[in-house]
Amino acid sequence: MVLILAIDDWANVAYSLAESLKSIGKPALALTKKKHSFHYPKEAKVYSTPRELKNAAKKADTIIWMHSKVTKVPTSGKKLLVFHGGSIYRRDPGKINRIFNPLVHASLIQTGDLLDLGAKNEIWLQALVDTATIQPSFEKVSELKTIAHFPVSQRTKGTPQVYQVIEELKKSSVLKDKFRFISSDKNVSWKENIERVSKCDIYIDALQLELQGKKYGEWGIAALEAAALGKIVVSHFLSYERYLKEFGNCAIKHVNSVEELEKVLRNLIQMNDDQMKEEKVGTREWVEKKHSLEVIGRRLLEVINKI
């Protein structure tokens, strides 16, 4: 059995990884200290006592620590991995590596900007999404093309730049009557967010190319969920070329500047209905082939089996 341990904020990703392994027949359990603040309908089980945690660890042959945080459990004779996928590792990879490199056999890295920072035996394990739970709709939601942007954090999603581009597009006599823009930075539950994203044609994930004084620009779970819903997804993606080499095609419209975002949106707004539907269907197919539970589960089990 693979035991995946979260603290709180990553209970949803821990759960998804466990489900990805179970989907291909590998027993797995995700445990967390606290629930996620976004109230995901399905997430890691909250363990109630240290004894429950210890007993689960004893039964496991493999332990994965989520998002660069250690939960103390018995580890003797087990395969040990850490998952680096967020700001904790991004802020101080040297410090985190000093903690985990002596402990683990391998390091799972979620986003391209966290690669090559010194983690032990790093493996690029891309984000995943439950394509069975999230079902797509490829039909128009309005007579106008609907563009949406729902940032969890304006600071990390480049929201001012997104608004800047939208305002420029509204000035165009050719485009202004062909699209509408909906946006909110209000944090809502996972279910509410899925509902609001489902009401657009084009989803802008992010355009923030520097974070904490370093180059940054990687899409994550929100972009994948929008793609699973059958939306055309536009996002920064500095690791685009590396992704192509390792995983093949990518359906996300990568934009790494304000100018690129404006150009891509102009082209999308002027597409006819058939072209838009083709893009939506292609985006959903890409998610199924590259980021479904089964696909990521097979990749993760392959990593585990090689340890």
Image (cartoon, grey):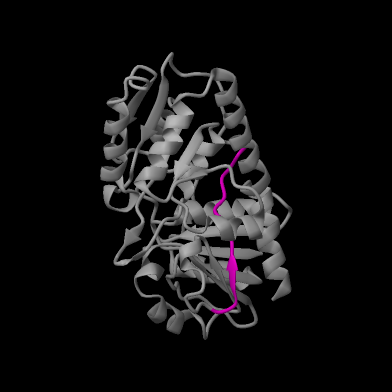
Report which quarter residue 245 is drawn in. Answer: bottom right
1 or 53: nearer the viewer: 1
Rendering quarter of residue 34: bottom left
Q: Which residues are magenta?
A: 120-132
Position of 184 compared to 273: left or right?
A: left
Q: Can the viewer see residue 199 in this picture?
A: yes
Q: Residue at x 39, y 58 (%)?
A: 8
Seen from this angle, which residue lies furthest top? 143
Rendered position, 60 above or below 221: below
Task: Give residue 167's position: percent from left, percent from top.
Answer: 27, 32
**Is residue 194 visible in the rendered structure shown here?**
no
Residue 125 is one of the magenta-drawn residues: yes
Image x and y of residue 152, in percent: 33, 46
- Give the total of numbered labels: 0
Residues 70 and 295: in front is 295
Quadrant for the C terminus, please.
bottom right
Q: Residue at x 43, y 27 (%)?
A: 200
Question: Taken as a whole, is the magenta stretch helix, strand or loop?
Answer: loop
Reply yes or no: does residue 274 show up in magenta: no
Front one among 245 and 31: 245
Residue displayed at 58% across by 24% down: 275
The image shows residue 186 at horizontal and vertical percentages of 27, 38
